[in-house]
Each structure stands twice: as structure tokens, then as C-alpha cells.
Amino acid sequence: MKIYFSIAGLCLGAACRKLVMRRKQRRNEVKMKGRKSKIMALLLTTSVVLAACGNAGTENSNGNDAASGQTAETAQNTTKTASSDAADLVWWGWTPGSPLNEQYIAKFNESYPDISITWKQTTVDDYDAAIKPALANGEGVDIFEVSAGSANGGVQIFGSKAVDLTDALKGYLGDDYADKLNEASLSSMTVDGQIKALGVGTCYAGNLWINQDLFDQYNVKVPTNMEEWKEACAAFEANGIIGFVQGAGQGAFNIDTWHAICDNVKPGEFTKATRGEAEWTDETFVTALNLWKSLFDEGIMQDGALGIQQYPEANNLFLSGQAAMIMMGSWYTMNCLPDTMRANMEAASSTDDPFAMVPINFPDIAGTGNVGYVFCDIDYAMAVSTCAKDQKAATDFALWLGASEEGQQMIADSLNLVPVLKSVTPNWDNVTLVNGEKQNDAVQEYLTNAVNNPDNPRFGGIGADLNQAMMDVLAGVASGTMTAEDGAAQLAEVQAEQ
């Protein structure tokens, strides 16, 4: 059975509606020939509807019993044989991409050889525009990725097209499933009391990544404050290398940078404001907006930053060795693995050997000493479409990736995300980095610190209107068309209207 990752929508198409109408007409003609005839007609109509929605829950499903209540141990150790009625299913998403997704699929197929999965990827910015009509159309989406809150693929927006996974999780992990998983993997994916998707891993943001090889080559000090950051950028610029690169034309990553600045000014205040516990017009946020502007005025942001995207442009500049620093989060850790970095460097049109990149704290540009704070969300979650051709098989894959020890160990060892299954951590004995001497301690310390950070959501607590307002304000302040005070007032106005 093939699982393609794409986008689908309404379960009943024109053909299905015609069949239902035909059934109604037949019942009118026959009138009432007894209770048994009525029941048979209803069952037949229902089977037509289910067939149009993808054969969900039928006996010919290729999925194992995990989707319908098999225990985790049994589900994880059962090898399935191919079904005579193989279905073609499609998985859509934007992350993490090749080659990791193909590796996940290959491992899954060792236990589920009858389920062949094809990964279909869109860009971060294109995802919503692509998946919305596909889900509305009702064909082609079996599994699709969602994120927390109102970011791209937001579960609040697309959750209505996903099945409730609560019973499947109880069957897979037991009644105490919630105790075994990261709280955010469930709470941020619950809509109207239903678990609409299962988080795969947590991603953290608020830190920088640096090309340690370039820092060593040019004997540049790793920056810890504004002055050192300016000096580092100037040193690299003198050698024809971009010091710090950011695609400031992509608003979500600007929010990350500003959130980090806010935490540098006063930790936790950003999160309080999103919850209505602090005012956006407070001095903390005016100061943070002015510091954001200073990144452009003081030569930290590269020339033309507002005209490029974080993906692909800024990412490509960093991975190709043309920039020494970049604002990325824990998802970037996967580039510490030689094969993953090599593949991503090739995608960035670089034929150089992989280099040693390491995470560093966001510099103390506010001079407060408040550093090392990060914020997190479920990076992406697996949702099973209400119109999946085979909901049991699609659910099996979602559960395997997000709730099995085997799938979560792959997530952990890929270093792309922090696993949501609490019992799983990276097996460092099996993880080989590009340059262990330069990277091992820094990466392990970074991930440990991230997991132990306080409650500080990334996008999960930001509503759609506030998200857009933040992007607009940050672009306006950066370009000089809006003052920090006016920007803070605009955020406060939007917050009040939510």
C-alpha cells in the first residue's frame, strides 16, 4: 500500500452524492417493505459513503490493530503481510524533508512492509495555500502535518479535517498515555476535546548557530553581547563573509528573534503578554523593539535582510559557508550529522565538505545577563485525514512515528527534534557528528538546557491576528516606517480585539 503525503478535503464528491440520491429514490419507489429492508438499505448507503471517504475502518484495511486498540507492545512487534486490496495513500508536509523522512519510512517498513509511503513536501510558506484546497477537495490526503496554534499548518485551522486519535492512543499506549508523552504533544493538538494530531517532536528556538570552522579559521571570538557581535560581523565582512544572516522577509523567524530579545530584556514577559497577563505597551516590549531595530542599524543584520527569506536564501547562505551565523532552532541540530548536512549543503548548491556548526546563546544585547532562554512548540504533528483511503494504516504510521519507542528513537537520533515520548533520548553512542571534538559537548548541553527551560511557547499561544500583527510591526520597525512605541501600541490594540 502506498501512502503519498498530499492534501485532500471533502469526503463526499459528486459521485457519492449521486449514489446517495439514487438510494433515496429507490427507497421511495419500494416504500416500506419491512424493517429488514430499511436496515439493509441504510447499511448499503453507509458502505457507499465509507468507500467514497477512503475505505476507512473496513476489513480490507492494510493497517494493523494499533489503530483500533491493540496494545503498544503487540503493535510494535507485529510484522504485517501485504493486503490483496492495497491502497494508494498520500502524506503531505513541510518538514523535516529528505533524507530524514525517507529514513523514517524505511524503518517503519521493516515492521509494516505492506505500507509503502511516499513523502510529498511543500515549502513552509506554501503549505497552507497548498493544503487548504486539497483538503476541501476531499481526495489525495491521507496523512498531513499540522503545527500548534496559528502558524503554518495550524491545527486550529485544519483540525476539522482530521480524525480524533484519542481512542487510538489509549489502545496503543494504555489509559495512562498522557503520562508517557510530552504534555505539549497532546495539549497543543487538542481541539474541542479531541486529539486531532499526534506531536512527533518538540522544537526549540531562541539561539544562534555558528560555523565554528570559520570562527577558528579567522580567529573570531564567539559573541556574547552586542559589542562582540558587531565585532564578529565586522571581522567576517572584512574577509568577504557575511557575519550574521537572517531572512527578515519571512516574518515567523523575525518573531523568533524578537522573542529572544524580549526574553533577554525580561524572561517570560513575552509569554505573559500573549496570555493577556502583561501589556504590549510595557517598557519591556518598547525596549525590545528598539533593540530589534538596532540589529539593522548596527550592522548585525546583513544588507538586504528584509528582501530575502530564511528558507531557502538565508539557510543556503549559511550552509554554503557564505555566512558565519544564523538564527535557527533545535531543528537545525540535524545538520550536525554528516550525511544530513552533506545532503542539505548539496541542496544549497555547495560541494564543500560538511563543517562543524555549534549552537550558542542569543547574545546579551540588552546587557541584563538574561541569556540561555529558549521557547518551544511541537514542531509538527501527524494528522490522519477524515478522508484517508485507509484510516487504520494511516493511523498506524502516525502512532509509530509519534508514540512507539522505535519511531521516537529515530526522531531522537536524527537530532531534528526532541522526542515527545518521555522514555526516549538520543543514543549518543550511536550518534556520529561532523566533528565530535567541537560539537559533542555543545550540542548535548544545548539540548539538555532546552528541555529544562520553563514554560515558554513559541507560536502555540499566538493567535492568527496577533501573529500577523507581530510580523507587520517587526517589518515596519526594522524598515523605519514605524516607531517602537507605535508598534507596541498596535500589538496592544490587536490583543484587545482577540
Image (cartoon, helix red, strand yellow):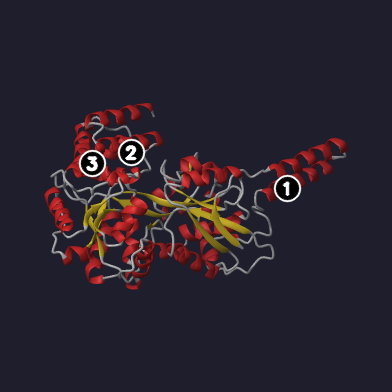
**Quadrant for the N terminus in the image:** bottom right
**In front of the other: 253 or 203:** 253
User: Residue 451: x and y, percent?
Assistant: 30, 55
Amino acid type of the residue that numbered disc 1 sits on in the rendered structure: Val
Is residue 254 visible in the rendered image? The answer is yes
Q: Nearer the viewer, mark 3 or mark 2?
A: 2
User: In the drawing, does residue 403 fall left or right of residue 254?
Assistant: right
Q: Position of residue 437 (x, y in %)?
A: 22, 71
Q: Which residue occupies the foreground of this view, 50 or 453?
A: 50
Relative placement, left or right, of 2 versus 261 is right
Residue under label 1, please give it: 48
Q: Where is 117 relative to 18, above or below?
A: below
Q: Residues within 10 Å of mark 1 (few under 14, many from 20)?
A: some
Query: Mark on residue 471?
Result: 2
Give the CA distance from mark 1 to mark 3: 55 Å
- Res 262 label: 3
Q: Is residue 203 visible?
A: no
Q: Are marks 1 and 3 in contact (CB under 8 Å)?
A: no
Circles 2 and 1: CB distance less than 8 Å?
no
Using the image as rendered, state which of residue 487 and residue 154 is in the foreground: 487
Q: Residue 31: x percent and y percent? A: 86, 36
Q: CA distance from mark 3 to mark 2?
A: 15 Å
Residue drawn at 64 percent across, 52 percent down: 56
Name the residue at 42% across, 41% down: 150
Earlier sequence position, callout 1 versus callout 3: 1
- The vertical placement of 81 against 403, above or below, is below
Query: Amino acid type of disc 2?
Result: Met
Q: Secondary structure at mark 2?
A: helix
Query: In 3D space, how far apart are the residues under numbered discs 2 and 1 (Cα atoms)?
Result: 47 Å
